[in-house]
Image (cartoon, coloured by chain):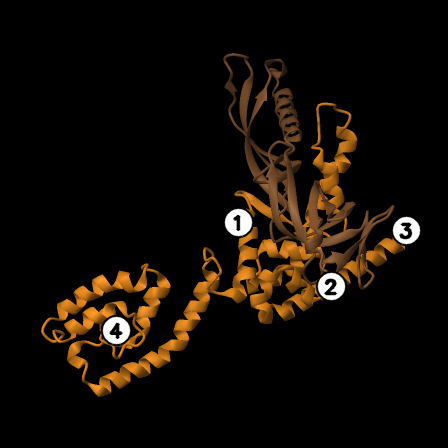
Chain colours: A brown, B orange
Amino acid sequence: MFLKTQLSWNVLVPAENLDAEGLMLQRAILTRLLDDFATKKAVKDIGYFIAVTTLDRVGKGLISQQSGALLFPVDFSCITFKILPGETLEGVVHKVLKHGIFLRCGPAEKVYISHHKMAGYEYVPGENPCFVNDKGLKIENGSLVRVTVIAERYDEAEKDFRALVSLEGDFLGPV
Amino acid sequence: MSEKGGKGGRSSLKSPVGNGDSSGKQKKGKKVQFDSEDIMETDTPISNGKADTPAAKGLALNPFNYISPATENDVAFRIRVLIVYILLIPTFYHDMDEGGKGDKTANGSKKPTGKGSTTAERRLDQELPPNSTCLMDCEAAEILQSIQDQMVILSQDPDIKLPISFDTGLTYAKRGGNYAKPETVKKIFEPLKKHGVSDCEICLITNICPESVDEVFAVVPALKPKMSKLRDPLRIALAELANLKEALANLKNSTT
């Protein structure tokens, strides 16, 4: 689910970007903020960073005595994407394995359905492996599937989320 | 009060722990009413384990807890107490139901029927970080698309960067091909708020684009307890949404 979040960060502006004219300083603060935002791929609490929407407030700068850079406290709003347990998502299949399927839901690529959570579906091996159920519904690479989220976990090392999802429930499955 | 229940040959409801003590002190009941109160203080933790709400309510159930020795033999009084007790039982269970559903910290073991829905809703609300609000996919798509449109000009400046998740996020937000304005969609589902549907649940519903009321309750199980109240408003909202989609599709076909 997409979230709109308000954050407060400290933005470090190098001394060479400081200018007597205020406009260049504001630009420097904004570009540094966008750079920091783009570098941080995701955070455990609020999910994947998608985009900064508004710059709400820029506080007074503090001078770093060692480097001469300025540290500005900045309040801004942004859009993030977080997978919430219990949520219903739609994902695109990008890997079909014997014991399950990997989906891509927005920025999250490690959304996994175990075959245990695909009641009625049987694995069909081959050049283009897929899962098929007795009603003829097919789940293969590129299929859009509606799932419900059982659990999610944040991988700090990779700055990525992994989610375990299920097809068990009404109105879930290939769309 | 538990010891009075212990006097219970009347209190078959009471725990057996206090019975021995209270039967001994029963003979002294008239002499010293305070003794019974002492027993009450000691008995309460023993019989209930923890001073917990259900236990307290369990104690409160026994009307004979409130009978003083002086009126014990007054049959008419006892009959009146029983009548009041019988009248209070439905309200007590109503309160227990509300407490079970409203008790967000419960493990859910008390109310198995409501467990799944309370847990699911609780999880969604729990997982929402502070200073965050839910966005509908169409809302996010509109904002991200406007940023994408501005990037045509902003990309000339190499200092301006977008996160790597931007493109995948925008693709996901636009996946339904739903070109309805978020304000219009919000207005359609606004009446549901009067029936206790939260913003998060409305976002869940609009993101899935359900075609039937049953689909809504399947996708958002937290709404099942309010099914009877929500069925009609949901049906109306989904019909309006379907009309809007059809009108937009016709408009798109006519322009292409």
Q: Residue A170 is drawn in which quadrant?
A: bottom right
Q: Earlier in the sequence, mark 2 or mark 4?
A: 4
Separation (CA) of disc 4 from disc 1:
42 Å
Label drawn at residue B211: 2
Tags 3 and 1 on a common chain? yes
* Image location of residue A33, percent across then percent down: 62, 27
Separation (CA) of disc 1 from disc 2:
28 Å
Tell which tag, 4 or 1, sits nearer the viewer.
4
Label drawn at residue B126: 1
Residue located beneath label 4 in the image? B5
Tell which tag, 2 or 3, sits nearer the viewer.
2
Figure check: A103 above or below B8? above
Q: For mark 3, does the 10 Å Cα neighbourhood hold few (<14), some (14 to 19), or many (20 or more) residues?
A: few
Q: Earlier in the sequence, mark 4 or mark 1?
A: 4
Q: Are marks 4 and 1 in contact (CB under 8 Å)?
A: no
Separation (CA) of disc 2 from disc 4:
57 Å
Residue found 19% across the figure and 71% down from its top? B22
Tags 4 and 1 on a common chain? yes
Name the side, left or right, on which A157 lies relative to B76.
right
Q: Is residue B68 visible?
A: yes
* Image location of residue A59, percent across then percent down: 52, 27
Label drawn at residue A38: none
Name the side, left or right, on which B145 lies relative to B42.
right
Mark 1: secondary structure: helix
Q: Residue B121 is drawn in which quadrant?
A: bottom right
Q: Amino acid at mark 1?
A: Gln
In the rendered structure, the residue with mark 1 lies on which chain? B
Residue located beneath label 3 in the image? B256
Residue found 71% across the figure and 26% down from its top? B160
Figure check: A165 above or below B103? above
